[in-house]
Image (cartoon, rainbow, N blue to C red):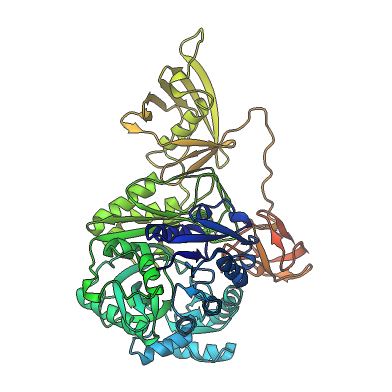
Amino acid sequence: MFKKILIANRGEIAVRIAKTAAQMGIETVAVYSDVDKNALHVASADQAVYIGGSVPRESYLNIERIIDAARATGAEAVHPGYGFLSENPTFAEAIEAAGLIFIGPCAKAIRAMGLKDAAKALMEQAKVPVVPGYHGPKQSNDGLLREATRIGFPLLIKAVAGGGGKGMRRVDTEAEFSRALASAKSEAQGAFANDAVLLEKFIPSPRHIEIQIFGDGESAVHMFERDCSMQRRYQKVIEEAPAPGMSDEMRAQMGKAAVRAAEAIGYKGAGTVEFIVDATEGLRPDRFWFMEMNTRLQVEHPVTEAVTGIDLVEWQLRVAAGEELPMAQDAIELSGHAFEARIYAEDPANGFMPVTGVLGHVNFPSGCRVDSAIQSGDMITPFYDPMIAKLVVYGENRSDALAKLSQVLRKTQLVGSQTNLGFLIQIAEHDDFSRGCIDTSWIDRNVQKLTSDNAPSQAVVLSAALAVLTQHTAPNRLTGFHLWHPLKKTLNLLWKGQKIDFYAELYPDRVVLVSNSSIGTEKDALTDSQRFDLEYKVSGWWFGPDLLPEAFWLGNKIWVCDTASQVFDVPDPLDWVESLGTTADIIFSPMPGLVSNVAVMAGQKVEKDATLVVLEAMKMEHVLRAPCDCIVKEVLVASGDQVEAEATLILLENLGLSLSSGHC
């Protein structure tokens, strides 16, 4: 077994690998960039080596510096984690050429599955069912359009390289094809330096079900399935194992197909074979097709570990060190049910736009597995994927596990940055999800309801008001010494610019709040002249039988952790200056990012929805479009510029509508 390994990654996966290595008595070496010098993955390792700037190409994608770090520290092997260089065959070859061991498949196997078109051809030879479509050499617009017409609409355009939904577009009509193709090719070129695409017939009511496999270079075993159908823009949101509605017959057939796929390329290590399933009439053994194979550990691997009791990283280390597969197929058992929810720094109400910021308070509940590298005080930066954490729960059955998922999501506290927590809770508690009645388009069909920016509940507003009253004193010392009883105060809050006023009567261990405002339209809304009698007990403030949610001060804002964090501003009574807001003739950057393309020039007339600027941030492409027919007055940026959030990019003339931006 290895004595020391280098982890060529960052974030939660680096922390997770270091944990298993420590349990096995293996020392670990972390690598880090400028922005990560104080990161948890650095502290989790026995040694750490600085490898360059915050931009990935200067550090985590710099093969030479990673190898130098391994040599300098005496590491015997390199674990690539996932993302970055994990599926780069050149990296695997460079590791081996340096006399080190790559903890993963050989470069030949990575190449075999690295391009989706070649992988599909190989799978056809291995008698693995493949989605109907086109994965040939034609790449001209006209040639691909002819193939699309032959296949029929709707269909998917997919980049042959990479994954994660990048370079993927659904096309419903022939008229949409050319624009979607150009967009997919552009994103694929930027993400993978390869703009080649393939075409696939779009499957109605599709489920995304994948099989975890593990090989030793000759034979392979599978560890059953994960259902990853809960997706948004082909990005997984919540995963579970096993798949709802899966029969033993279908599980066996999918497992055998996945093993054939692995053995066809002499696969060694952990991998995932992904299938698309037509669930129009439920799960049937004759309606699943190969999509692609991920030649690495998957983000969602913890749900498989939960239902099998297998540590996949331990298996990776043992097999890479030359040991046999730890278990035969008939010894691997499936038990219980598990869910994984991915928490991201993003704004669901604003098109899931990634956000940055400092997480001033981070607290995850007990009763679940937390894979995260985020601590209180950490900054969410624009340089890397915006995932904050993965919460994994296990239950004896699906309903038990789902109840736990809802509970741990509601108890998670993240203060200082917008997150998708509320969105995840909406999904976890939805009747369709409870019944297992979902497909890969379910979020898209329900996105408006799932992301509605609801007004805060009474409990949330009361908690924020109490935070104002107790900012400079202990909760049970509100009154102090005074000549009048009770002590009376007024207080003010702002929620998204809306004023909320209260009149307060203060007593020892008790506060009476009378609202002078109305907010919300539901039965739990706050209305004018409502009276609330609140009592402080050891565990916090109570309103009747209910404990109010916790509130936290961060700067001049109050964050209340309840479902999704609600944020309140506390106005300065001496400050009467109001924000002018954003005028409608300015296109500004919604986040920090790299300007990858400026599509217009000064004086140019553009139509509504025309592409103006393309930004790259947090591994995604974000397209800013014209909100109406207009004239470009001035262009203030150029391709290659790094811009901050809210930086002015373009000025427009004759614009009478509000700014809108979209993603392609």
Q: How many marks?
A: 0
Q: Give the quadrant of residue 643.
A: bottom right
> Looking at the figure, which quarter contains the C terminus?
bottom right
Is 197 left or right of 435, judged from the image as shown? right
Look at the image and tell me in which quarter the N terminus lies: bottom left
Image coords of residue 483 (percent x, y): 51, 7
Residue, x 47% and y 36% (percent of image)? Answer: 551
Q: Is residue 565 visible?
A: yes
Residue 420 falls left or right of residue 98: left
Which image quadrant is residue 31 in?
bottom right
Residue 517 in the image, given as x and y percentages of width and height: 50, 32
Residue 160, image x and y in percent?
51, 81
Of 374 and 556, the residue lying toward us: 374
Q: Which percent across, then down, holds residue 240?
A: 33, 63
Q: Is residue 276 visible?
A: no
* Nearer to us in this view, 457 or 471: 471
Which residue shows up at 37% across the image and 73% down it?
A: 319
Quarter of the rendering containing residue 143: bottom right
In this view of the protein, which residue sits in the foreground, 537 or 489? 537
Q: Nearer the viewer, residue 100 or 396?
A: 100
